[in-house]
Image: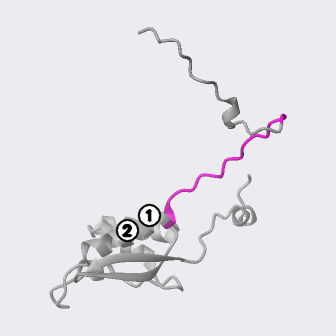
Amino acid sequence: MILSIENLKAAGSFVGQPVKQEIVWHSGGKEHKGEVFVRMASYETVTKEWKDQNSNHDMIASRIANFVCDERGQPIFTVEDVLGSAEEGRGPLGAELTIALFAVIGNVNKPRAPEEKKPLTGSGTDSSSLALVEKPSRKPRRT
């Protein structure tokens, strides 16, 4: 393919809208459920992560702040929100919520392999049919 805006659009190479995800976590002895929106990795998220890394920010907090957003793609956390602060009178996000957020970020952004197409057989049978499997030999194996 020759790279052009039209060809890249056709190939789905531009990031779309944030993806809605459900998360579940426990705190205070109760189960909580919530919906979050997660950005797809893009030029913007990658460059923000590089800047945060060069500024010695916590990379997990940076990833949560850069990927978790509202339905319009606006961030809902800053790195400082994720890490908490004494001035605001609260600590960092709880471990289970952090893991749940990190999991949906990974789920939305994991590479997807193209679906494999099975070759057609000329006989009309499925090549994975049990009828095609040889029965195990009863002859003892030599060791």
Give the class, few, some or many, for how many residues have Cα within 10 Å of label 2's Cα (few <14, many ≥20).
some
Residue at 49% across, 71% down: 44
| In the depicted structure, whether residue 113 falls above or below residue 56 | above
Q: Secondary structure at mark 2?
A: helix
Q: Secondary structure at mark 1?
A: helix
Mark 2 and mark 1 in contact? Answer it, CB < 8 Å. yes
The x, y position of residue 51, in whole percent, is 37, 68
From the image, give the main secondary structure of the stretch colored magenta. Answer: loop
Q: Please state which of residues 63 and 113 is positioned toward the viewer in this rendering.
A: 113
Numbered range of the magenta stretch: 108-123
CA gap between label 2 and label 1 equals: 6 Å
For residue 10, which numbered disc appears in the image? none
Residue 116 forms part of the magenta stretch: yes
Q: Position of residue 22 (x, y in %)?
A: 46, 77
Tell me the amino acid under the disc marked 1. Gly
Residue displayed at 19% across by 82% down: 91
Left or right? Give the position of 2 relative to 84. Answer: right
The image quadrant that residue 98 belongs to is bottom left
Q: Residue furthest front?
A: 138
Which residue sits furthest bottom?
A: 88
The picture quadrant where one finds residue 133 is top right
The one nearer the camera, 115 or 110, is 115
State the residue in front, 79 or 90.
90
As displayed, is residue 100 above or below residue 141? below
Give the residue at mark 2: 102
Task: Indicate the quadrant containing the C terminus: top left, top right, bottom left or bottom right.
Answer: top left
Q: In the rendered structure, which amino acid carries the disc numbered 2?
A: Phe
| Residue 125 falls within the magenta-colored stretch | no
Residue 106, label in figure: 1
- Residue appearing at x 52%, y 85% in the figure: 71
